[in-house]
């Protein structure tokens, strides 16, 4: 069984010994986690006790009533959502992760996004929320946003008036949270377009599925003690090797990997030169530390003769039948990485899988 935000439920049983809720108390669904079987409810009494369905808590759905009353709820919820999105996009974002903030904005955005995605109360409590206990605006909101043909305010029972307030407030809170997450993604996204990349998070990458990959050597210090990945590469996970990722990638991505590797070699050489190593020894040092990598037509040549101390340690990596490459897949320590940890991502980012 699943639940949608805005649905009305009544409590049947909870194992929480400290709650003041009683069987029959009613509330509005805020969110539902089907994996953990956690149902977040805004109870009419003001309680925010979540239902742990897998632990024996039980609720029942309340009848939705006629279509007219459902449309009233929908209209108030939509109006609240518009207000919540505006609040998060304007004053909250500018004050927390936007232009008015100095310092480690990226670090703050990442912490907030992580907290939103994991339901951390300390983060959620810092987001814009509607005040459910200021009643002065209820009549005006209802009059402005109720659909044509809806009962006038004076015809509503006290419970119906409460329900219109909860609908507006729930719409506000849900939209403010979604917009706050979107604003954080804009700060973190390498392209700045705010796309939701949760389907590419490392823990969601599966064999045969897409991900963003980088070498475990790629982490680079950033201001404030943070570590960033200068460039991540889009690919499809096809195997694992000693716990590391093996992935296929397009020609565009393969070329970027070769260029990135050559830049790593150049930085290694410069570091050694800055440390006082004689010019005559620099190339030898780099070759003993890192393979040489280049394209020969459609083939990638990987020369590790000095790394391995073996004159035959030269590999030629041809594209597969589908035109995709596996660049050093069973030799280098690749791993799936968090896309928002990357300053730049090479390759076409796939859309989230269809919910259908």
Image: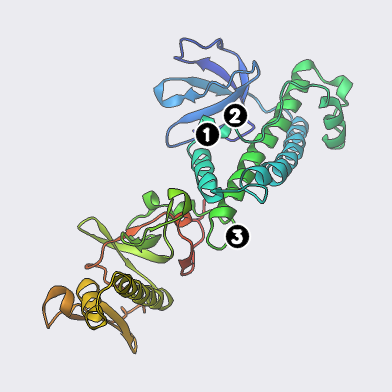
**Who is closer to the viewer here, 1 or 94?**
94
Marks 1/3: CA–CA distance: 27 Å
The mark lying in front, picked from 2 and 3, is 3
Image disc number at residue 193: 3
Q: In the picture provided, is 151 more to the left or to the right than 62?
A: right
Quadrant of residue 280 in the image?
bottom left
Query: Do callouts 2 and 3 mark residues in contact (Cβ within 8 Å)?
Result: no
**Who is closer to the viewer here, 228 or 73?**
228
The mark lying in front, picked from 1 and 3, is 3
Quadrant of residue 259 in the image?
bottom left
Callout 2: SS: strand
Q: Residues within 10 Å of mark 1 (few under 14, many from 20)?
A: some
Q: Position of residue 84 (x, y in %)?
A: 71, 39
Query: Do callouts 1 and 2 mark residues in contact (Cβ within 8 Å)?
Result: yes
Callout 3: SS: loop
**Who is closer to the viewer here, 53 or 101?**
101
Q: Residue under circle 2?
A: 29
Marks 1/2: CA–CA distance: 8 Å
Q: Residues within 10 Å of mark 3 (few under 14, many from 20)?
A: few
Q: Residues within 10 Å of mark 2 (few under 14, many from 20)?
A: many
Instruction: Tell me which residue sits at (85%, 26%) in the image.
Output: 139
Instruction: Tell me which residue sits at (44%, 14%) in the image.
Output: 15
Depicted 335 relative to depicted 179: above or below: below
Q: Residue under circle 1?
A: 32
Residue 3 visible in the current orientation: no
Depicted 236 relative to depicted 11: above or below: below
For marks 2 and 3 on the same chain, the one whose residue lies earlier in the sequence: 2
Residue 222 visible in the current orientation: yes
Q: Position of residue 74 (x, y in %)?
A: 73, 36
Callout 1: SS: strand
């Amino acid at each position: 069984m699943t639940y949608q935000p805005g649905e009305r439920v009544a409590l049947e049983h909870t194992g929480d010994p400290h709650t003041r809720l009683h069987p029959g108390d009613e509330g509005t669904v805020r969110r539902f986690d089907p994996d953990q079987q956690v149902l977040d409810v805004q109870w009419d009494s003001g309680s925010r006790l979540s239902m742990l369905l897998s632990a024996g808590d039980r609720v029942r759905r309340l009848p939705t009533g006629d279509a007219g009353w459902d449309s009233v709820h929908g209209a108030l919820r939509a109006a609240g959502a518009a207000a919540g999105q505006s609040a998060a996009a304007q004053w909250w974002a500018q004050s927390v992760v936007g232009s008015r903030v100095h310092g480690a904005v990226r670090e703050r955005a990442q912490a907030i996004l992580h907290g939103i995605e994991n339901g951390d109360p300390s983060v959620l409590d810092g987001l814009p929320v509607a005040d459910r206990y200021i009643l002065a605006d209820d009549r005006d909101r209802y009059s402005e946003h109720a659909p044509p043909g809806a009962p006038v305010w004076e015809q509503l029972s006290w419970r119906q008036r409460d329900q219109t307030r909860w609908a507006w407030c729930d719409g506000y809170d849900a939209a403010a949270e979604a917009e706050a997450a979107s604003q954080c993604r804009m700060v973190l996204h390498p392209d700045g377009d705010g796309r939701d990349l949760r389907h590419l998070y490392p823990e969601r990458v599966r064999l045969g599925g897409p991900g963003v990959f980088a070498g475990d050597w790629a982490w680079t210090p950033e201001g404030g003690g943070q570590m960033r990945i200068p460039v991540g590469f889009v690919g499809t996970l096809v195997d694992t090797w000693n716990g590391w990722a093996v992935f296929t990638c397009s020609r565009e991505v393969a070329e970027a990997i070769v260029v990135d590797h050559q830049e790593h070699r150049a930085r290694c050489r410069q570091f050694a030169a800055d440390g006082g190593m004689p010019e005559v020894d620099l190339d030898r040092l780099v070759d003993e530390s890192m393979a040489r990598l280049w394209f020969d037509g459609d083939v990638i040549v990987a020369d590790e003769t000095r790394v391995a101390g073996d004159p035959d340690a030269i590999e030629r990596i041809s594209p597969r039948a589908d035109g995709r490459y596996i660049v050093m897949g069973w030799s280098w320590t690749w791993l799936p990485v968090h896309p928002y940890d990357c300053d730049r991502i090479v390759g076409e980012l796939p859309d989230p899988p269809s919910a259908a």
